[in-house]
Image: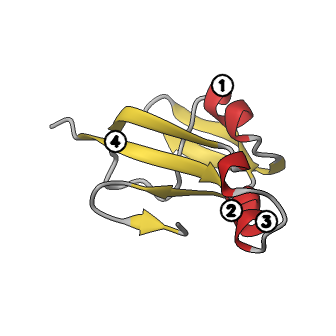
């Protein structure tokens, strides 16, 4: 069964700076994905490279990930925060 939802994702570092009054809340880099696929068994958030770049996330490390095509190396980026109609993390 395919589950999708709308999700708003923001750069956590920007949110922290906005909360401290260092930048305006309008300057927080964020994107809204109207039809995000929900994987209820996922332990991490997977984003396409254009969204990572738009959010200004920075690479931190690499990790192995198990996919349907086998084990692959993935880049771990700085944390985003997100919210959906049902819940939010960090916003």
Which residue does the numbered mark 3 point to in the structure image? 17
Residue 60 percent across, percent down from the top left: 83, 53
Tell me, for residue 15, which label it has, or none: 2
Q: Is mark 3 on a helix, strand or loop?
A: helix
Q: Please tell me how crowded label 4 is: few (under 14), some (14-19), or many (20+) other residues with Cα within 10 Å.
A: some
Tell me, for residue 3, which label it has, or none: none
Q: Please tell me how crowded label 3 is: few (under 14), some (14-19), or many (20+) other residues with Cα within 10 Å.
A: some
Between 68 and 91, the one lying in front of the other is 91
> Tag 3 or tag 4, which sits nearer the N-term?
4
- The answer to the question of whether label 2 and label 3 lie on touching residues, with beta carbons closer than 8 A, is yes
Residue 24 percent across, percent down from the top left: 74, 56
> Tag 2 or tag 4, which sits nearer the N-term?
4
> Tag 3 or tag 1, which sits nearer the N-term?
3
Tell me, for residue 50, which label it has, or none: 1
Which residue does the numbered mark 4 point to in the structure image? 6
Q: In this view, does 45 lie to the left or right of 17?
A: left
> Tag 2 or tag 1, which sits nearer the N-term?
2
């Amino acid at each position: 069964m395919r589950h999708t939802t709308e999700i708003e994702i923001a750069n956590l570092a920007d949110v922290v700076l906005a909360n401290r009054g260092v930048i305006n809340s309008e300057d927080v880099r964020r994107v809204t994905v109207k039809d995000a696929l929900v994987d209820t068994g996922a332990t991490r958030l997977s984003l396409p490279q254009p969204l990572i770049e738009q959010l200004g996330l920075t690479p931190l490390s690499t990790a192995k990930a198990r996919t349907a095509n086998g084990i692959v190396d993935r880049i771990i980026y700085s944390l985003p925060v997100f919210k959906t109609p049902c819940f939010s993390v960090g916003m």
